């Protein structure tokens, strides 16, 4: 049942099927008044959709129908039969990769929004992996405007020091052995949420490569990058040790049919002392970063 959120926006927990039928958990945010845009918010790796509810509600108040959702194996989409109350079972044996997230889950979310709101412009917000996924989608041409936030081609060599060495050790000396031992990547090892084994190992493989996923010759979905011809703006957060300027530029280079715009964001721009990889979505940025992002994202001209 739809419920009124504190900021006068309706929100409803729903489900929709991925392209292979896997059931994904989602939340739909709707304004009380007229809707002018459809916006899809796509999560970072190991980040549940609830992190984005503040920004989603903000966009809904500005007249957008907004969908957030969890990729398979995470959050409410951990397993279709395990969304009941109580702690979910282990992810050991759960089959999924990051490529699956993009090609089956994100692509289905785009299709669901496009079908449901077929008369409205479809906008795309991609945080970290959510931004990377845009280029992998077979239907990314359905998106007219995309805002990438802290989205990057995340090779470890492009991270700042000493963070790059911490990530190198965490992934290879802790994460990989523990994942093989347990059959999934436990979030308590410093990863955020638990991750399916295939997701984590593919992520590590990409991180270790010089050009991240662009060096993965087996990733056939890379051929979809040129299909995107909409407007693209990438926000590069100055104090983000993972999505550095070179890493953001490398991801944007993959969109060969357009000229992506990269905007540098410094904490002082919003009166903050730090923002980092996740801080953009904190409510304190409602009147600064959120406002500027929404004005561009919901701009009428294409």
Image (spheres, rainbow, N blue to C red):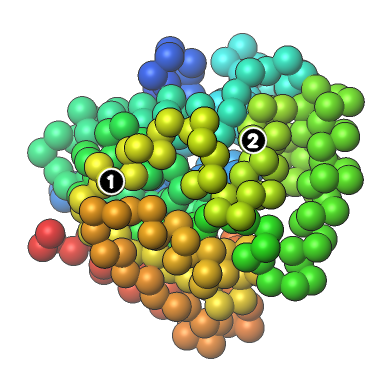
Q: In the image, is residue 259 above or below residue 146?
A: below
User: Total marks drawn?
Assistant: 2
Q: In the image, is residue 285 above or below residue 208?
A: below
Which disc, if any, is residue 124?
A: none
Q: Which residue is mark 2?
A: 202
Q: x, y percentage for residue 232?
A: 29, 60
Q: x, y percentage for residue 146?
A: 31, 54
Q: Which residue is mark 1?
A: 226
Q: Nearer the viewer, residue 159 or 24?
A: 159
**Which secondary structure lies at badge 2?**
helix
**Residue 293 horizontal side relative to residue 166, left or right:** left
Residue 37 in view (yes/no):
no
Residue 117 in view (yes/no):
yes
**Which secondary structure lies at badge 1?**
helix
**Residue 81 horizontal side relative to residue 88, left or right:** left
The residue located at (85%, 53%) in the rendering is 169
């Amino acid at each position: 049942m739809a419920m009124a959120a504190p900021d006068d926006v309706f929100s409803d927990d729903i489900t929709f099927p991925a392209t292979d039928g896997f059931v994904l958990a989602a939340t739909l945010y709707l304004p009380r008044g007229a809707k002018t845009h459809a916006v899809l918010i796509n999560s970072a790796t190991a980040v549940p959709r609830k992190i984005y509810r503040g920004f989603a509600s903000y966009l809904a108040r500005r007249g957008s129908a907004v969908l957030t959702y969890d990729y398979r194996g995470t959050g409410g989409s951990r397993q279709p039969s395990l969304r009941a109350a109580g702690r979910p079972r282990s992810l050991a044996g759960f089959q999924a990769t990051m490529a699956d997230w993009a090609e089956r889950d994100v692509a289905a979310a785009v299709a669901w929004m496009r079908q449901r709101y077929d008369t409205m412009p479809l906008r795309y917000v991609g945080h970290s992996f959510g931004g990377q996924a845009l280029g992998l989608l077979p239907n990314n041409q359905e998106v007219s405007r995309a805002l990438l936030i802290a989205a990057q081609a995340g090779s470890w060599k492009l991270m700042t020091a000493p963070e790059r060495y911490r990530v190198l050790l965490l992934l290879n000396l802790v994460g990989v052995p523990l994942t093989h031992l347990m059959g999934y990547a436990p979030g308590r090892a410093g990863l955020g949420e638990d991750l399916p084994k295939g997701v984590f190992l593919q992520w590590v493989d990409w991180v270790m490569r010089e050009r991240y996923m662009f060096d993965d010759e087996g990733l056939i979905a890379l051929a979809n990058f040129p299909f995107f011809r909409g407007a693209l703006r990438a926000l590069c957060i100055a104090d983000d040790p993972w999505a550095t300027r070179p890493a953001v530029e490398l991801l944007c280079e993959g969109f060969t049919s357009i000229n992506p715009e990269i905007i540098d964001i410094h904490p002082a721009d919003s009166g903050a002392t730090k923002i980092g990889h996740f801080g953009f979505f904190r409510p304190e940025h409602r009147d600064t970063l959120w406002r500027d992002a929404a004005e561009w994202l919901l701009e009428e001209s294409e």
